[in-house]
């Protein structure tokens, strides 16, 4: 599945962080489109969080608003479909990380705007 490919890609240092996140996003979208049970993905989502952290992939989201937005939208759909606590926790953690990265990126750009005006 695309989820498995995304997790494998995250292990590979040659794969760009943004590409790894896009693969995970697309894998989740494909999983939902196929009407598969999102709760089956809890272990893969926990592993994905570990790899995304280790590779510092979330930092990419503060520079790519479109990727952050589409990833957040997919996670929102996943959260609505999740029934197991394990899956809900993993999705909540991913959502929190995406939100933190997005907020961090907005703060960075605001700081840059202030410096530009000086």
Image (cartoon, rainbow, N blue to C red):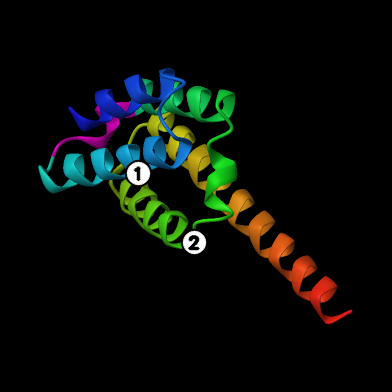
Instruction: Tell me which corner region of the image, top left, top right, bottom left or bottom right, holds residue 25.
Output: top left
In depth, the one of 79 and 14 nearer the eye is 14
* Segment colored magenta: 36-41
86 relative position to 59: left or right: left
Residue at x 46%, y 33% (from the top left corner)? 90
In depth, the one of 86 and 114 nearer the eye is 114
Residue picked out by circle 2: 65
Residue 116, label in figure: none
Expressed as whole percent of the image width and height from the top left, the position of residue 115 reads 84, 71
108 relative position to 45: left or right: right
The single residue placed furthest to the right in the displayed view is 118
Of pointers 1 and 2, the one earlier in the residue sequence: 1
Instruction: Tell me which corner region of the image, top left, top right, bottom left or bottom right, holds residue 59.
Output: top right
9 relative position to 59: left or right: left
Instruction: Tell me which corner region of the image, top left, top right, bottom left or bottom right, holds residue 113.
Output: bottom right
In depth, the one of 75 and 27 nearer the eye is 27
Expressed as whole percent of the image width and height from the top left, the position of residue 51 reads 49, 23
Residue picked out by circle 1: 22
Q: Quadrant of the N terminus?
A: top left
- SS class of the residue under badge 2? helix
- Sort mark 2 into few (<14), some (14-19) or many (20+) by Cα contacts within 10 Å: some
Is 74 located above or below residue 40 in the figure?
below
- Sort mark 1 into few (<14), some (14-19) or many (20+) by Cα contacts within 10 Å: some
3D distance between C-alphas at marks 1 and 2: 12 Å
Residue at x 43%, y 27% (from the top left corner)? 48
Please identify the dominant SS of the magenta region. helix
Residue at x 23%, y 47% (from the top left corner)? 29
- SS class of the residue under badge 1? helix
Is 95 located above or below residue 7 in the figure?
below
Residue 39 part of the magenta-drawn span: yes
Expressed as whole percent of the image width and height from the top left, the position of residue 97 reads 57, 43
């Amino acid at each position: 599945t695309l989820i498995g490919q995304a997790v494998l890609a995250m292990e590979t240092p040659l794969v760009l962080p943004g590409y790894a996140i896009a693969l995970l996003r697309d894998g989740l979208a494909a999983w939902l489109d196929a009407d598969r049970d999102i709760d089956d993905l809890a272990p893969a989502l926990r592993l994905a969080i570990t790899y995304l952290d280790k590779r510092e992939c979330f930092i990419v989201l503060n520079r790519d608003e479109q990727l952050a937005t589409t990833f957040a939208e997919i996670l929102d759909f996943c959260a609505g479909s999740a029934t197991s606590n394990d899956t809900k926790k993993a999705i909540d953690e991913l959502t929190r990380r995406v939100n933190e990265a997005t907020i961090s990126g907005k703060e960075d750009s605001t700081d840059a705007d202030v410096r530009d005006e000086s």
